[in-house]
Amino acid sequence: MPHILIILFFLILSPSSIAGTNLGTITSVKNGFATIKECSVAEEVSLPCRERDLGVLSGILDQVSTNQCITSSESYKNLPKCPQGEDQVKGLDNTYPSGGVFVTYLVENAGFVKHLTQQLLEGDELSKVNIVIPQKYAATISEHPDLVKVINNPRVNVIISKTSVATNLWMQDYFQFTSVNGKPAIYQLEHIRESGMSLEARVACEIAKSCNLPYFIPPDMVKERNKDARNMNAGGNLEVLPGGTFLRGVQKRDGYQRPNSSWGSFAETKTQRDQEDALEDSKNRVLDLDISFVQTGHIDELFNVVKTNAPAPCNYAILASDPKLAVEILEKEAAKKREISKNCSDFDYEKLKNKFNKVKGFSKTELANIYASQCINGQDVKSFVSSKVFSVLKRVNVEQSDSNYDRQRDNIKDLVKELKKTTKCNEPKIISVPVLFRDGFSYTPELTNGVIQTPESGASRAILPRTYFGPFDQYIEKELKKYGVETTLVNDLNYHLNSGEVHCGTNTARVCHE
């Protein structure tokens, strides 16, 4: 459809004709993206902000803010310039400073929220940490005094989710932070758990109103044929590369993503095609890579970006999941002469998750014991590598024709070609990350899938999921250190055992100088 017709399509819509559902009332359209009346900033009310917004927590969290979500660009001295384009939706990659990180509190992840918040506050003097708390769980915060002690901080912003019944662990999936006219903006995406809900009842809309942020929906959101179908348009499948290119995953070959009536072709859903049109209307480039061998269909399972200590224009590196590297490390460790560990059953991921949640963390001694055991999800590495399971995983990941490694290798070729063109870096740095896929999911917590905290000056810090397998964790720490990137490992087993990781559970707003 020509771009002008997309815009005309928006302008003639009435609220009752939007996709046959009560999505919202379109107020304006610019460059293919619509704004919604129901997701604009709410009018001021008479109650004091703290009492109104925090409710039962107003007497417990007396240091936090409730509507200061992202550090103002005026607080920085040397921000990179924003992408050019009036009223155009632009992306900021991970080399831009982190202005605010968002995460959901859901009781069972109290230990994760505590540790993550602590690390984020220590790692950057300026950026904010936003904790979204479903109203039904607000009273449970007082049951975690260690958590309260960490989050009761002026740099923590708390959002009590009153209308969004779908609030869950996966903060990344709801929306993508973008930049419009030099300011952070929320770009609504289609989280399967919010299917059929009005925009006003969605997490992104509530955050936009609480944080006073512009809120945009793309063309496909108002089309009956797409309306939240399984269309590969969730937040984890829209990322930004250095140079400003939007990165997406599509199914280029036979794999886990099954086409349905909302898909336009084998490689690209109709929704993704509409999204691409809108992004290109805002003068953006879009790169599609093959996600066929990943169950979630999210590109953040395969790639991440860090800022390094190298000079521009090559001051970045791409973390890329590498199944072949994972196999090589496992086989190397299994070949070492030593006795098979007898206590590995104590260190399977479910038991580690339960123990971590109970004590809210592991001591240095406990961690040392876990690593010394050389276990991988409850099995000694020697036993694992000699098992039939590993034999199958090695074949699918590395040995067979068109293996996972082959597909990822092709992805990297296309990625490097794009980066050379957009960043003018002749040799983009690719850091291989050991990731072994089993049935389309990472067998261990996936080290590629982390939150990247970037300060105003200097290299990033990568907050990554701890695999509890020493050779994997030590490898990524050593590799990132070569480029000035500090690594912090966190326990995200609540997420991993639910088919996600640290990046899936967070969302980061980045800032720039207009």
Image (cartoon, rainbow, N blue to C red):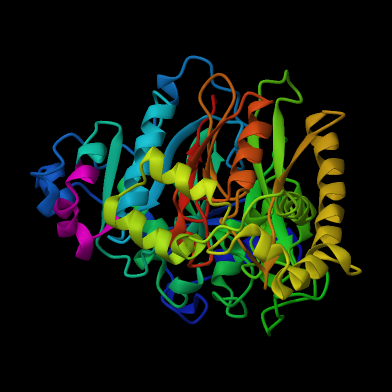
Q: Where is residue 93 in the image (x, y as percent from the top left)?
A: 62, 38
Q: Position of residue 232 (x, y in %)?
A: 64, 68
Dominant secondary-structure state across the stretch colored magenta: helix
Q: Can residue 506 be seen in this view?
A: yes
Residue reaching furthest to the right: 401
- Is residue 479 toward the left or the right of residue 504 in the image? right
Residue positioned 53% across, 51% down in the render: 373
Depicted 155 relative to depicted 237: above or below: above
Q: Which of 386 and 359 is in front in this view?
A: 386
Residue reaching furthest to the bottom: 261
Q: Which of 294 and 96 is in front in this view?
A: 294
Depicted 50 relative to depicted 380: above or below: above
Q: Position of residue 491 (x, y in %)?
A: 44, 50
Q: In which quarter of the image is residue 278?
A: bottom right
Q: Nearer the viewer, residue 206 or 10?
A: 206
Q: What stretch is highlighted in magenta?
A: 133-148
Residue positioned 32% across, 70% down in the render: 165
- Is residue 215 toward the left or the right of residue 336 in the image? left
Image quarter where the N terminus lies is: bottom right
Residue positioned 86% across, 59% down in the render: 406
Depicted 43 relative to depicted 487: above or below: below
Residue 305: say if magenta. Answer: no
- Is residue 148 toward the left or the right of residue 47 in the image? right
